[in-house]
Image (cartoon, rainbow, N blue to C red):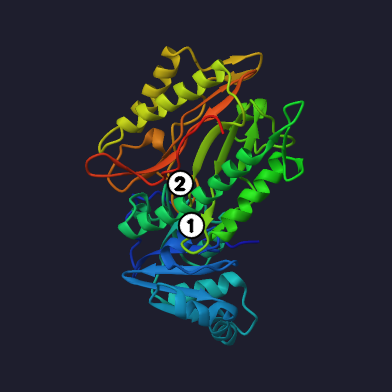
């Protein structure tokens, strides 16, 4: 049973609360791994698969981690000090005369650094928060980005994103190459290298190319043809066919920098029908409309609404037909960086130089197929800069 805090303060206070009297330092606390923990990797530039502790008190950044990672962290982490978990645990055990819990070790480390008032992410463990409060700490959550500066990418980050885009384009080039070389069977099934070409086979080839170029995927690349392409997050499965729209959406992570690429192209192996051509061209014009409106102080919501209105004008309203969505029913884009989908949200953003977004309107018509065009841009002082440059073609 966790003992209640003697101070009887709220567990997670709002960020506008004043510094607690007697606190030496209002510190930021993270407890996370950094392979996928974007905030931890951003703060430390140190990649580790198991959770460790980051404390930012004043202008000093300190890590507490297990001896397994100690020497590597001291070489690689962008922090001021790296402290051994076992050394702190030994001190606490001597003081308390019993083997300390993880919370007691963390608490001793934080107090030794002069911190009582802790700012933590909104996703911070509720149970751990209660335990720390019971030991005399005051916790306050920060909504949104834990490091707000992540929203505006620095020049080095733009370079990382450029590299991630290049890796993504290598994967896309491989997909197009295989589709072009595939043969069309009697029933319009595609065959490549003597076997049926499936979404799974093409995905594997694409992800091998990405891996060889320095990227990491989770096997989630979207290669969806025909009616499967009407569901925007359908990964795709089974045979691929000629004369059908095929959505290729690749989003690998650069293994060195940790930043993501994201690129979508829609193609037809063979001959596109007039209806497919029209859908593809209208979707492309919708993306071009969005790009023309990208500039500082522009409203992401208004850009999204302009694209929606354009599609309606062209005869593609967003509606439900027989229980399925038809038209344009997702966002115009999303933030991109150390996470595939990160703040700020495009639809809620007022654009600023340094923002990086995907611009990816899509049209999905059950019975016909789906089309999505996606590129990555960064907002500049005068407009935008494209970070992806892969050509768009309908028929391959």
Pick out the residue farthest to the left: 382
CB-based contact (under 8 Å), mark 1 and mark 2: yes
From the top left corner, tell me how far across and down residue 234 is, in percent: 64, 35
Per the image, the residue denoted by label 1 is 38
Pick out the residue farthest to the bottom: 94
Q: Residues within 10 Å of mark 1 (few under 14, many from 20)?
A: many
Observer-nearest of 346 and 84: 346
> Which residue is depicted at the point 46% across and 64% down?
137
Q: Which quadrant would the N terminus be assigned to in this image?
A: bottom right
> Does residue 10 appear anywhere in the picture?
no
From the top left corner, tell me how far across and down residue 133 is, in percent: 50, 62
- The label number, if any, that marks residue 342 in the structure image: 2
Provide the secondary structure element on which disc 2 rests: loop
Q: Which quadrant would the C terminus be assigned to in this image?
A: top right
> Does residue 37 appear anywhere in the picture?
yes
From the top left corner, tell me how far across and down residue 115 is, in percent: 40, 70
From the top left corner, tell me how far across and down residue 209 is, in percent: 59, 54
Provide the secondary structure element on which disc 1 rests: helix
Observer-nearest of 340 and 387: 387
Would residue 301 be found to the left or right of residue 210 on screen?
left
Count how many numbered circles sit on residues in the image.
Answer: 2
Disc 1 or 2, which lies upstream in sequence? 1
- The label number, if any, that marks residue 235 in the structure image: none
């Amino acid at each position: 049973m966790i003992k209640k805090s003697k101070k009887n303060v709220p567990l997670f206070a709002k960020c506008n609360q004043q510094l607690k009297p007697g606190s030496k330092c209002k510190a930021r606390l993270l407890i996370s791994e950094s392979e996928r923990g974007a905030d931890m990797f951003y703060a430390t530039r140190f990649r580790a698969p198991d959770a460790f502790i980051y404390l930012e008190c004043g202008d000093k950044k300190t890590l507490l981690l297990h001896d397994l990672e100690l020497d590597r962290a001291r070489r690689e982490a962008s922090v001021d000090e790296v402290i051994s978990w076992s050394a702190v645990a030994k001190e606490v055990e001597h003081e308390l005369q019993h083997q300390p819990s993880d919370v007691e070790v963390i608490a001793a480390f934080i107090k030794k650094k002069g911190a009582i008032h802790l700012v933590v992410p909104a996703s911070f463990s509720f149970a751990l928060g209660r335990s720390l409060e019971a030991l005399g700490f005051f916790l306050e959550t920060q909504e949104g980005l834990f490091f707000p500066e992540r929203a505006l990418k620095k020049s080095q980050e733009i370079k990382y994103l450029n590299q991630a885009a290049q890796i993504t384009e290598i994967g896309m080039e491989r997909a197009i190459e295989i589709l072009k070389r595939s043969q069309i069977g009697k029933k319009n099934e595609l065959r490549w290298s003597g076997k049926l070409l499936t979404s799974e086979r093409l995905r594997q080839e694409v992800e091998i190319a990405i891996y060889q170029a320095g990227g990491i995927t989770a096997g989630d690349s979207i290669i969806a043809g025909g009616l499967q392409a009407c569901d925007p997050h359908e990964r795709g499965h089974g045979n691929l066919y000629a004369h059908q729209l095929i959505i290729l959406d690749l989003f690998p992570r650069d293994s060195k920098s940790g930043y993501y690429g994201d690129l979508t192209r829609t193609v037809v192996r063979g001959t596109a029908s007039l209806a497919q051509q029209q859908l593809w061209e209208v979707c492309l014009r919708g993306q071009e409309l969005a790009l023309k409106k990208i500039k500082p102080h522009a409203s992401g919501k208004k850009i999204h609404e302009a694209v929606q209105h354009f599609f309606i004008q062209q005869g593609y309203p967003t509606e439900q037909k027989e229980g399925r969505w038809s038209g344009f029913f997702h966002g115009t884009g999303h933030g991109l960086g150390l996470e595939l989908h990160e703040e700020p949200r495009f639809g809620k953003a007022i654009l600023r130089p340094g923002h990086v977004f995907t611009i990816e309107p899509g049209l999905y018509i059950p019975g016909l197929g789906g089309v999505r065009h996606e590129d990555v841009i960064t907002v500049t002082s005068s407009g935008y800069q494209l970070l992806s440059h892969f050509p768009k073609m309908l028929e391959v």
